Image (cartoon, helix red, strand yellow):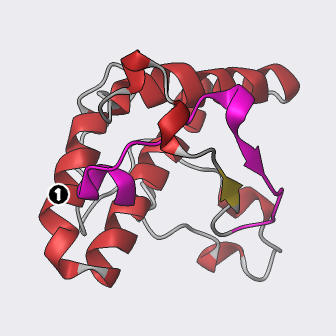
Amino acid sequence: MAAAATGHRLDLRLDELWWQDTLGGPVPLSIPEPGSLPQRYGQYEGVAVLDEVVAPLTAATAGLVPISPRVLWGNVASAVNGAAAQVAERQPDLAGAAWAAAAGLFASPWLSRETSPPGPGFRRSSCCLIYTIASERARARGVCGDCVLR
């Protein structure tokens, strides 16, 4: 989102990415310098990121565990909204550009089922299922920040 909001180019091809597996929160990510980008990556293209990076990751996840693609793509929508919110909070002058980039992603076929537009009031249209891992005592509070169950 930050790259899209500032007009920077990033090489997000899966074979060029390195990340650290972490539990919760942002994932530490390492990407190559943008000088090595193929011509087709000349501009930020959010749908290309969804098609070429996120879709293969969601498909791989669905192949490993029994989870609905709708839930996975709802999680992607939540992450897109959360990333735009982080940019807007930390760099208010980039808020408009970050929300516009998020809206562009929400217009893609992958995220177009979301009924709530990106923004501070976003509510996902599918459950992330986080309440299923909460303890019995904490289950009532075991909902995410953009929970469809609220």
As displayed, is residue 113 above or below residue 79?
above
Residue 28 placement, left or right of 39: right
Residue 70 appears in the rendering: yes
Residue 130 position, x and y percent, is 67, 59
What segment is highlighted magenta in the picture?
1-24
Compared across the picture, whether 56 is left or right of 79 comes to right
Q: Which one is in front, 67 or 80?
A: 80
Residue 9 location, quadrant: top left
Q: Quadrant of residue 121?
A: bottom left
Residue under the image location 33 percent in, 19 percent down? 109
Residue shown at 24%/39% (left/top)?
A: 115
Q: Is residue 21 magenta?
A: yes
Query: Given the image, on which type of amino acid does mark 1 rest?
Result: Ala
Image: 137 above or below 49: below
Q: Identify the residue under disc 1.
A: 97
Q: Is residue 3 magenta?
A: yes
| Residue at the spot 31% in from the left edge and 36% down from the top edge | 105
